[in-house]
Amino acid sequence: MKRLLFDIDGTLLETHGSGADALRQTMIEEFKLENPNTEIAFGGRTDRSIAEELLRINGLPIDLEHRNRLFDAYSDRLPTALSSRGGRVLPGVIELLETLRDQAKDFPLDVMTGNLAKTARMKLEHFDLLSFFGEVHGGDLDVCRDAMARRSAERIESHCSLPLVVIGDTVADIRCGRAINAHVIAVATGSASRQALLSEAATGTDVVVFDSLASTDEVMGWISQK
């Protein structure tokens, strides 16, 4: 038995910038900024980290009040952004999740993502994937992705100790998988190039890089043998 921890953006889904669009609208409407600076990197980060950088570069206090205002307003705007921007489930994802669901006793599925737990569920529900997963571990509390992973692993181990497999699309996913002694599947379907993933994978063990999750048998074979 192994517990699988899936990332969302770039791994399961492509949302065509819905999150960035909702954040920009939040900065304009909630904080009354005519032309907010939202030119930041998003891939592989927690929403806590993204929120604090957005507040800082726009001259706003980085405190609990402003962070909560940003999170609440962003969560309110995300469903509209998802509907207007479109997006898709990435190739092979549904087939893999259905295969894993048929073997749920051996492979319970969770989500571990930099997204807020609330907005992670919104994205999964929007694309009809939420029912595949049990727990959603989000990036609400931690700036550092590794710290988020450790918090998630501690929560999991408090009620069920199983080997962990992290599945993600960035170098940060590989690193946070290592931080919790997990096996890692990296897929070149997101913001990181295949070469960047291979370079990071080469610095340790128990990491495999796939072009995508479309080769269900190959992915399942790797998971099963670990």
Image: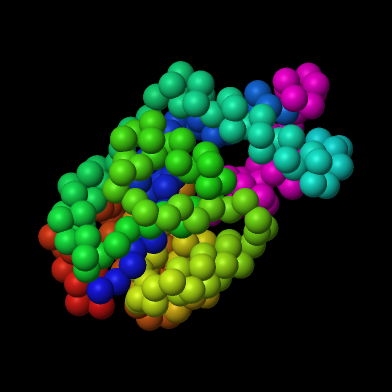
x, y percent for residue 6: 38, 56
- Tell me which segment is drawn in magenta: 28-57
Where, quadrant-wise, is the C terminus in this rendering?
bottom left
Question: Which quadrant, please, contains the N terminus?
Answer: bottom left
Q: Nearer the viewer, residue 127 or 218?
A: 127
Against 138, residue 144 (above or below) is below
Quarter of the figure with residue 27: top right
x 62%, y 51%: residue: 140
Q: Is residue 83 magenta?
A: no
Please indicate, yes or no, whether residue 14 appears anywhere in the rendered image: no
Looking at the image, which residue is at 59% across and 27% down?
76
Number of callouts = 0
Q: Is residue 32 above or below residue 62?
A: above
| Residue 148 lies in quadrant | bottom right
Residue at image location 73% in from the left, 40% down from the top: 68
In the displayed structure, does residue 6 sit left or right of residue 102?
A: right
